[in-house]
Image (spheres, rainbow, N blue to C red):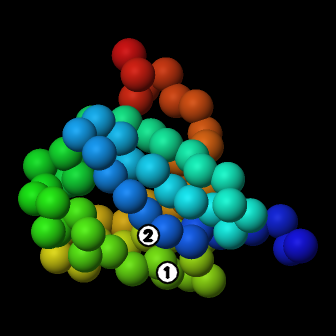
Amino acid sequence: MNGLIKGKEVHFDEEYLHLKLGDNRIISTPIEWHEPLKKATISQLKDYKLICFNTGIKWECLDYHLNIKSMLEYSLEQVA
């Protein structure tokens, strides 16, 4: 393994962005941490692409990119 955290599938519920990783673990972050996603419609949320060798997620229609590794990093700014 090359140490990269790679995504496989993206799912949503009312509160969370869930990401299934290449090794089948699932990580989740509150949608409210991602302002463009919080304001998006279900149709827009489902319109994503895995990018950069599956290490990022892109929502073209929202002009929003998310680095998967950043989902694992704890930030006091995001929860304060």
Q: Secondary structure at mark 2?
A: strand
Query: Label 2 is placed on what type of residue?
Result: Ile
* Vertical position of residue 6 compared to residue 51: above or below: above
Q: Are marks 2 and 1 in contact (CB under 8 Å)?
A: yes
Query: Label 1 is placed on what type of residue?
Result: Ile
Residue occupying the point 83% across, 65% down: 3
Q: CA distance from mark 2 to mark 1?
A: 6 Å
- Crowd tier of the residue under label 1, counting other residues whose Cα lies within 10 Å: few below 14, some 14–19, many 20 or above: some
Q: Quadrant of the C terminus?
A: top left
Image coordinates for residue 73, horizontal then vertical, percent: 61, 39
Residue 24: quarter of image: bottom right
Q: Quadrant of the N terminus?
A: bottom right
Could you tell whether 3 is left or right of 72 in the image? Answer: right
Image coordinates for residue 69, horizontal then vertical, percent: 61, 55
Could you tell whether 25 is left or right of 66 in the image? Answer: right
**Number of numbered markers:** 2
* Vertical position of residue 62 compared to residue 19: above or below: below
- Crowd tier of the residue under label 2, counting other residues whose Cα lies within 10 Å: few below 14, some 14–19, many 20 or above: many
Residue occupying the point 29% across, 45% down: 13
- What residue is shown with label 1? 51
- What residue is shown with label 2? 57
Residue occupying the point 68% across, 69% down: 22
